[in-house]
Amino acid sequence: MVQTRFDKQVEETAETVAFGIGRFLAGRPLDGVKRTDATFWRTGTRVLPKVEGRVSRSSYRAGWKRLTFRISALAAAGTGGYQAGWVHQDATLATAQQIRADPDPALALLEQMGIAAASTAAAGTAAYLAVTRKRRAFQREWILPLHDALALPLQLPEQTDPRRYLHIPRNFNDDDARIRVDVPRRLNFSKDLVADIIATKLALEGVTFSWHLSGSKTYVTVKKTRRPPSRAVVTDPTVHALVDKAPESAPVIGVGAGGREVSVDLDAESPHILVNASTGGGKSVTLRCIACQMLHHGSLVFVLDTKRISHPWASGLAGGPGTGRRPLEYWRPRAPRP
């Protein structure tokens, strides 16, 4: 049986309606174009590759949020239509006939409502700009430059909204502040380069990076390394006596069984020290202990901090760079420009 053009149009219309209902209930974009990595349960953080045109904020929302908004709007419209067309049908018809017979009062009312709405919108816009002035300045000075620098290493499309993956508080310079940057999965990027860009663009010093590259959410957190106290106080008199009587070339690095001191002899035939431990095992603390005791005795100490975050305690001490005094020399390489 030959299918007519009308039958084809009916089938295409029915198919379009069915797909539209499916997208509506699934919380997907009604045009069928997926622009972000958002799923039904998870909010999107980045724009998908090869997406053209402007990406609205609703494209980042999770599917259940879009579905909730659509059902609420549909319920509100249906309730209003039911009240006006069925419950108060007589009043609605009477009002329509009155407007048709004499439209001037209705037009005057609409004009007044338009003026009031325009005034309210202008006042609301002014209030919004005043309230968000600091936030917009923060976005312009810190967020956007960081986004521009990270776009290429993280392979982010130009339509990506930086507020969706850069979670930076305004007080990010405080010691207890926590910075989180969502990074894409299944993409190759240099973690060292990304870390250097974040530290350079936000003018951060003495921070640690924690990478979470497994699971459904992949991100990196940046926290400030707590500065050690300016003065080390030894409460145990036994340890205090051991440190005081230790010679300049044999700093104490610990106390063994029976109160026996553990030291290193820098005047031995081969004065080399190897400190080997896992992360958090105390390598930097041990080296700091040796350096502080040698500084106490007036020795010359060179601190080579290649990571720029291992020994921030040495920056600014008497004898450091810019003080014109010795015996401390602190060298920290400059971060490369992105």
Image: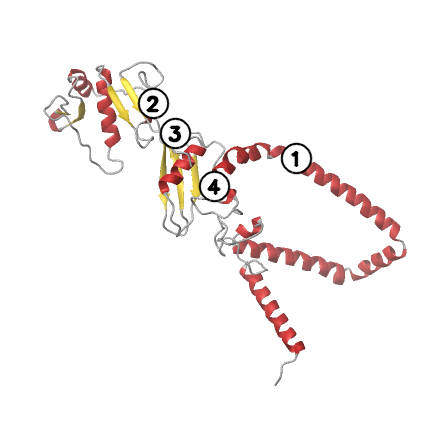
First in residue order: circle 1 vs circle 4: 1
First along the sequence among labels 1 and 3:
1
Q: Nearer the viewer, residue 179 or 333?
A: 333
Which of the two labelled residues, at mark 2 and mark 1, occupies the earlier sequence position? Answer: 1
The residue carrying mark 3 is: 205
Residue 307's spot in the image, x, y percent? 32, 32
Return the residue at label 2. Answer: 315
Three-letter amino acid code at disc 4?
A: Leu
Residue topped by disc 4 = 166
Nearer mark to the viewer, of 2 and 1: 2
Amino acid at circle 3:
Glu
Q: Is disc 4 surrounded by few (<14), some (14 to 19) or many (20+) residues within 10 Å?
A: some
In space, the residues marked 1 and 3 are separated at their CA atoms by: 37 Å
Residue 235 seen from this side:
no
Q: Amino acid at mark 1?
A: Ala
Please indicate whether residue 94 sits to the left or right of residue 189 in the image.
right
Q: Amino acid at mark 2?
A: Ser
Report the Cα–Cα distance between label 4 and label 3: 19 Å
- Name which residue lies at 30% across and 16% down: 319
Q: Are marks 2 and 1 in contact (CB under 8 Å)?
A: no
Label 3 vs label 2: CA separation?
11 Å
* The image quarter in which residue 94 lies: bottom right
Q: Which residue is under mark 1?
A: 127
Q: Residues within 10 Å of mark 2 (few under 14, many from 20)?
A: some
Which secondary structure, mark 4? strand
Asked whether the viewer can see residue 275, the reply is yes
Are circles 3 and 2 on residues that touch, CB within 8 Å?
yes
Q: Residue at x 53, y 50 (%)?
A: 60
Q: Nearer the viewer, residue 67 or 209?
A: 209
